[in-house]
Image (cartoon, rainbow, N blue to C red):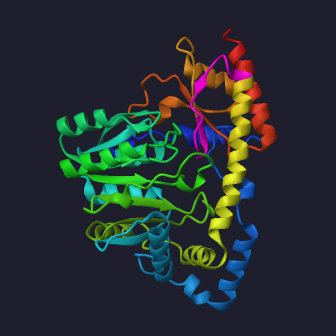
Amino acid sequence: MDYKFSNKISSLQPSAIREILKATADPSIIPLAAGNPAPDAFPVDAVREIAKEILNETPIDALQYGVSEGYEPLRKKVSDWMKEREGIGEEFDSTLIVSGATQVMDLVTKVLCNEGDTVICEEPSFIGSLNCFRSYGCKLKGIPVEADGMNVDALEEALSTTENVRFIYTIPNFQNPSGATMSLEKRKRLYELAKKHNVIILEDNPYGDLRVSGEKLPTIKSMDKDGIVIYAGSFSKILSPGIRVAYAIGPSAVLAKMTVGKQASDVHTAMLNQMIVYKWLSEHNPEKHIEKIQEIYRNKLNLMCNCIDKELGDFLSYVKPEGGLFVWCRLPENVNMLEFVKKCVDKKVAVVPGNAFLVNDTDESHYIRLNFSTPSDEKIVLGVKALGEVAKSYQ
């Protein structure tokens, strides 16, 4: 049969990261291309205990349908938790529980954008979100990311000259892939520019709790007195990505439409999973667990950067991030990035090519993204050493 696909999906290509991850199924491949939490970051015993308790005491609640807005005790807990920790939440805001933070991007785009509208995003940016915006026929306007976050002068120009901008997408903390953290001054200016141009900000903060150095900065959402910021938070990096529980906090009028959109997608997020997250937040000291995770990633980041300095210090450059999961490395101008990536695979090391994160992924890039959370310490050492061997072939 001659299968004909919709125009929206025909133009999308498989995620370069997911395609590369297929290669990591080979146990001989060192996975510097991934972005999974470290295996020892999971509170396995706590989740096992909680799940057993739920299924013994309230099994029907866990196995029955739930409301689309989310399990009410979890919604309230998340709202209170974020108000206390981040100063997020005004009278005009509400909370929606979703199935992974990418669903926030999907629902925001679904309810705000018509085909041909523009989404302003950082460049480079998370490929999963870029593909989500593309899937709705949106035009993407990339704004360069600097060491201290989005270039707000370029953002101002884009807002002044681009038609039908529906929202600005940003990852202000340990941005994926660049690792950059947006400065406080830029956060404030971003908010003021969005307010001036009557444009919503979609603040994606999956890595905010993974800070390992430097000073914690206020979220953009905490500055929101005008109902122009939608905040996407997730339990994937601090509890479990497999549970697929995340949340949006934003203006009630927008989240009400997102709830309708969710009903057309998955009806509601899995009840058992929501109940596990609620009990974990309520009974198992999440702040102490987050401190444990931060220590794990602090050690792994330092190890990777020390290895890069030793094996690749004269070959590539990078800015050490203050948290997150990734190191963004710039190759020399005379090195073909895709050729370098292929040579790495030949050395049994998977890295992500930088052009995967561009608005136009056919553009040239001199960057690669390395992940330090997934591989063991031993594989970090071996993997970076193999990259050093590849680098020597260019000298």
Q: Where's residue 54, x and y in %?
A: 65, 84
Magenta-colored span: 311-327
Looking at the rendering, which quadrant does residue 359 occupy? top left
Relative placement, left or right, of 213 versus 38 is: left
Q: Tell me: 52 left or right of 64.
A: right
Residue ID at (57%, 14%):
335
Say which of 115 and 206 sits in front: 206
Q: In which quarter of the image is residue 44?
A: bottom right
| Residue 361 in sight in this render | yes
- Which percent across, then down, holds residue 60? 58, 89
Q: Where is residue 36 in the image (x, y as percent from the top left)?
A: 64, 50
Q: Is residue 137 visible?
A: no
Q: Is residue 86 magenta?
A: no
> Which residue occupies 54% across, 78% down?
271
How far across and down, in percent of the image, does residue 215 sit?
54, 49
- Report the magenta stretch's main SS: loop
In the rendered image of this protein, does residue 35 appear above or below residue 305? below
Residue at horizontal 70 percent and vertical 39 percent from the top: 302
Along the line of sight, the residue nearer the viewer: 79 or 65: 79
* The one of 268 and 216 positioned closer to us in this rendering: 216
Q: Is residue 258 above or below residue 149?
A: below
Image quarter hosting the C terminus: top right
